[in-house]
Amino acid sequence: MVSKDFTIKNKMGLHMRPAQVFVTEMNKFSSTVNIKFAGKDINGKGIMGIMAACIKCGAEITVECDGADEQAMLDAASALIENGFGEE
């Protein structure tokens, strides 16, 4: 398992569009992905859990990937989050 801490940078947080971008990208991998936020584990391959978490700008999250392609998955997640999901 690999993991990395992030701060959400985009102004609107993980609203519908960036959540969908994240889920679409994560579903390209066979590994599992969990987002740790506010004491909860959120399935990073399911949009409903991400939306329900209400992850706002400035929120601290941890992304954990586990499986055969875990490092590639974490690298993809990192690129998305650090680039503000293409919104900025």
Image (spheres, grey):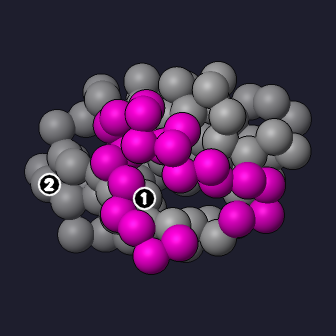
Give coordinates of residue 12: x percent, y percent. 81, 40
Give coordinates of residue 22: x percent, y percent. 50, 34
Task: Give the residues drawn in magenta, as a range.
Answer: 38-59
Q: Is residue 67 above or below residue 30?
A: below
- Please name whichever residue, 1 or 56, is drawn nearer the observer in this view of the structure: 56
Label 1 Cα neighbours within 10 Å, binned few <14 / some 14-19 / many ≥20: many
Q: On the rendered structure, is 30 left or right of 53?
A: left
Q: Residue at x 87, y 45 (%)?
A: 11
Q: Residue at x 40, y 67 (%)?
A: 40
Residue 14 visible in the shown view:
yes
Instruction: Say which amino acid is labelled 2.
Output: Gly
Give the alpha-carbon distance from disc 1 to disc 2, as whole Å: 15 Å
Q: Quadrant of the N terminus?
A: bottom left
Label 2 Cα neighbours within 10 Å, binned few <14 / some 14-19 / many ≥20: some
Give coordinates of residue 55: x percent, y percent. 64, 53
Name the N-terminal-most of marks 1 and 2.
1
Q: In the drawing, what numbered circle is on residue 35?
A: 1
Q: Nearer the viewer, mark 1 or mark 2?
A: 1
Q: Is residue 54 above or below residue 80?
A: below
- Please name whichever residue, 20 or 69, is drawn nearer the observer in this view of the structure: 20
Q: Residue at x 65, y 42 (%)?
A: 14
Residue 71 visible in the shown view:
no
Residue labelled with disc 2: 67
Q: On the rendered structure, is 34 left or right of 30?
A: right
Q: In the drawing, what numbered circle is on residue 82?
A: none
Give coordinates of residue 6: x percent, y percent. 62, 66
Q: Is residue 20 above or below residue 30?
A: above
Q: Quadrant of the C terminus?
A: top right
- Secondary structure at badge 1 equals strand
**Number of numbered tags placed on the structure image:** 2
**CB atoms of marks 1 and 2 within 8 Å:** no
Instruction: Say which amino acid is labelled 1.
Output: Ile
